[in-house]
Amino acid sequence: MPALSSVELAPDERLQVVATNTIVADVVRQVGGNRIQVTTLVGPGTDPHAFEPTPRDAAALADADVVFANGAGLEIFLEDLLQSAGGDVPVVPVSHGLELHQLRDVVHGRDEEGAEDDAPANGESDPHTWFDPNNVIVWSHNIERALSALDPESDTAYSANAEAYRSQLVALDVWIERQVALVDESERKLVSDHDVLSYFAERYGFEQAGAVLPGFSTLSEPSARDLAALQSAIRAWDVKAIFVGQTANPDIAKRVADDAGVALVALYTGSLSGPDGPAADYLSLMRYDVTAIVQALR
Ligand SMILES: [Zn+2]
């Protein structure tokens, strides 16, 4: 975490905050409330792994008091972008302090040999920390600490906002536990477009039977052998559905699902929906995804 010192703010001036993606932006807003002005780099419906920043993003960064990033290796574009912005804006990785899942820890139906040969080029640890609300509780503490350091005059407001939001995250966790209890333990098997659900799987007692794209990023490509191994894992594990993010290219996943005769189910993974969609904020995203997973597997 960077050392943060307080920013001089005029009485009617708000902290200028950049968030790298819509999920981080939502949680930052929950803590910052109306005392901060948030600009989001990777907008709704955009794959956070494949993002290409524009000069406008560099300008937003140059004007910012702070950048909140997911961290954990998600924002591979950020270092170059910070450099081209030319400033020395501090970056707070909201996942700071979390124990990250490593690729070797992810249980898979893929055969060992294949998994080893096809180690992904970018990202050895799972950046999708938001798929466990308990991790987002850690985010909220990191955000609260950072905002309070930058704007100490509002620290009681930030603490109160964060505390209220954390009680909603605890309620979400309880709700998810009740929902997944509707799925028989033997049916708690996940195949996704890339390895996006390891924190969810660990928290709620699911196994990851496989992924269409090997690894934690959508930027990897499956080999013919990967796909064959996935097909046999789907059969061997008697998997009912493949879960795909709205931002990933669904073509290969659709072919695998068609070949295996299993359902293709859309989730929100790396981005919120637009404000009028069913995943307009983080809590809605999780409720949407859990409902879809439970409906597909029960
Ligand atoms: Zn992802």
Image (cartoon, rainbow, N blue to C red):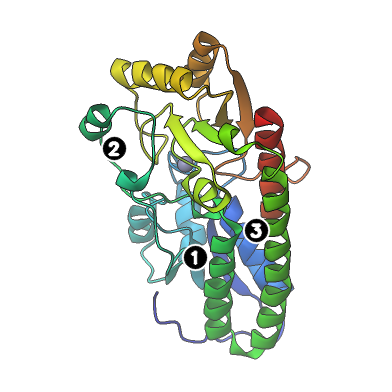
* Residue 111 drawn at (x, y percent): 30, 27
Q: From the viewer's perspective, tell me whether residue 39 is left or right of residue 82.
A: right
- The residue lying furthest to the right in this view is 276
Task: Find out if the beta carbon at label 3 lies less than 8 Å from the nearest ligand 1 atom.
Answer: no
Q: Quadrant of the C terminus?
A: top right
Q: CA distance from mark 3 to mark 1?
A: 12 Å
Dot 2, crowdedness within 10 Å: few (<14), some or many (≥20)? some
Contact, CB < 8 Å: mark 3 with mark 2? no
Contact, CB < 8 Å: mark 3 with mark 1? no
Q: Which comes before the other along the chain, label 3 or label 1? A: 3
Q: Which residue is mark 3?
A: 26
Task: Find out if the beta carbon at label 1 lies less than 8 Å from the nearest ligand 1 atom.
Answer: no
Q: From the viewer's perspective, tell me whether residue 102 is left or right of residue 295.
A: left
Residues 13 and 1: in front is 1
Q: CA distance from mark 3 to mark 2?
A: 29 Å
Dot 1, crowdedness within 10 Å: few (<14), some or many (≥20)? many
| Secondary structure type for disc 1 | loop
Q: Which residue is mark 2?
A: 120
| Mark sitting on residue 263 | none
For residue 259, above or below residue 15: above
* Residue 98 drawn at (x, y percent): 44, 65
Q: Which residue is mark 1?
A: 94
